[in-house]
């Protein structure tokens, strides 16, 4: 079964500190638990929501990995982001009450459904929650600005190095290795996100391997020289 409703409990979730603000008391946690009452399973390759769909909820990713994408005028699939456990997805729908992109599971995933009207209502009463929702939105804006900078001013090597560093840092925040990761997305999807051709992504990875910066075995990447990746990124911006 693709969709499965299960009783969710934020208070006992080990990703709580990534999704929710710190400092909520027991009563406030219980009220959030009543809002986030449903979890939804999404099979690999299935849509969580699609472009044009009516917006009703935000989704906290509990397990798994997603990509968001939009169809370009010439019919191509343009990847706009990758989201992982502990992150909120669906913010694009707030502006016009409908989603402006597709969200596809890159592996079997599970999300906690947060009905936005109820979340907004509770946010007005619990200011720490309201502040947190604003921070999540702000983080998304900052991320988009970062991507624009990446695409506008960086060479292929800098784009890929920044992408790998960002991904491993986000995973490390969730308790994973600071130097190893398994790519849930294809090289083609990475290229779409970074504005690079598939061949360029493959060639750049090969260059990093030749220079002893990373080890690559299919989708498994081990970073051998983090400082070298940082130097590649900072080359664009002097001694940042």
Image (cartoon, helix red, strand yellow):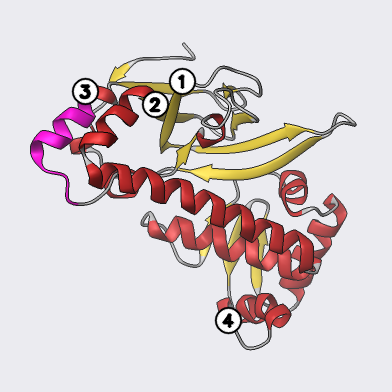
* Foreground disc of the pair 4, 2: 2
Residue 34 numbered mark, or none: 3
Kindly report the distance in space between the C-alpha atoms of the residues bearing marks 2 and 1: 6 Å
* Foreground disc of the pair 4, 3: 3
Farthest residue to the front: give it. Answer: 124
Task: Note whether residue 206 is visible.
Answer: no
Q: Is residue 224 left or right of residue 187?
A: left
Kindly report the distance in space between the C-alpha atoms of the residues bearing marks 4 and 3: 46 Å
Farthest residue to the right: give it. Answer: 74
Residue 192, placed above or below residue 93:
below
Whole-percent x, y for residue 220 in the image: 60, 55
Residue interval drawn in magenta: 23-33
Task: Note whether residue 13 is visible.
Answer: yes
Whole-percent x, y for residue 99 in the image: 59, 26
Farthest residue to the bottom: give it. Answer: 239
Between discs 2 and 1, the one toward the N terminus: 1
Q: Identify the residue at horizontal 68%, vertical 35% (top origin).
A: 69
Give the residue number, with chain letter if any, for mark 4.
227
Density class for disc 1 (Cα within 10 Å; few <14, some 14-19, many ≥20) is some
Kindly report the distance in space between the C-alpha atoms of the residues bearing marks 3 and 2: 13 Å
- 61 vs 199, nearest the viewer: 61
Q: Identify the residue at horizontal 9%, vertical 38% (top origin).
A: 26
In the rendered structure, are the residues bearing label 2 and label 1 in contact, judged by CB atoms less than 8 Å apart?
A: yes
Give the residue number, with chain letter if any, for mark 1.
56
Kindly report the distance in space between the C-alpha atoms of the residues bearing marks 4 and 1: 43 Å
Farthest residue to the left: give it. Answer: 26
Between discs 3 and 2, the one toward the N terminus: 3
Residue 178, placed above or below residue 11:
below
In the structure shown, which secondary structural element does the residue marked by tag 1 occupy?
Answer: loop
- 223 vs 157, nearest the viewer: 157
């Amino acid at each position: 079964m693709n969709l499965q409703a299960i009783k969710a409990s934020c208070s006992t979730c080990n990703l709580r500190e990534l999704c929710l603000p710190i400092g909520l008391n027991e009563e406030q946690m219980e009220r959030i638990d009543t809002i986030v009452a449903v979890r939804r399973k999404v099979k690999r390759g299935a849509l969580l929501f699609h472009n044009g769909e009516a917006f009703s909820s935000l989704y906290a990713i509990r397990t798994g990995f997603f990509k968001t994408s939009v169809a370009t005028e010439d019919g191509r699939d343009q990847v706009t982001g990758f989201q992982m456990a502990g992150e909120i997805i669906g913010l694009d729908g707030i502006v016009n009450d409908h989603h402006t992109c597709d969200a596809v599971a890159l592996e079997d995933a599970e999300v906690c459904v947060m009905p936005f009207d109820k979340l907004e209502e509770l946010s007005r009463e619990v200011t720490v929650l309201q502040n947190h929702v604003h921070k999540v939105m702000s983080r998304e804006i900052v991320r988009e600005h970062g991507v624009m900078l990446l695409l506008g001013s960086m060479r292929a090597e800098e784009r890929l190095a920044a992408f790998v560093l960002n991904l491993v840092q986000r995973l490390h925040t969730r308790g994973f290795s600071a130097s190893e990761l398994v790519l849930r997305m294809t090289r083609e999807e990475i290229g779409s996100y970074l504005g690079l051709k598939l061949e360029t992504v493959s060639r750049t990875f090969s260059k990093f391997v030749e220079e002893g910066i990373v080890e690559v075995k299919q989708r498994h990447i081990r970073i051998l020289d983090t400082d070298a990746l940082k130097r590649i990124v900072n080359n664009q911006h002097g001694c940042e």
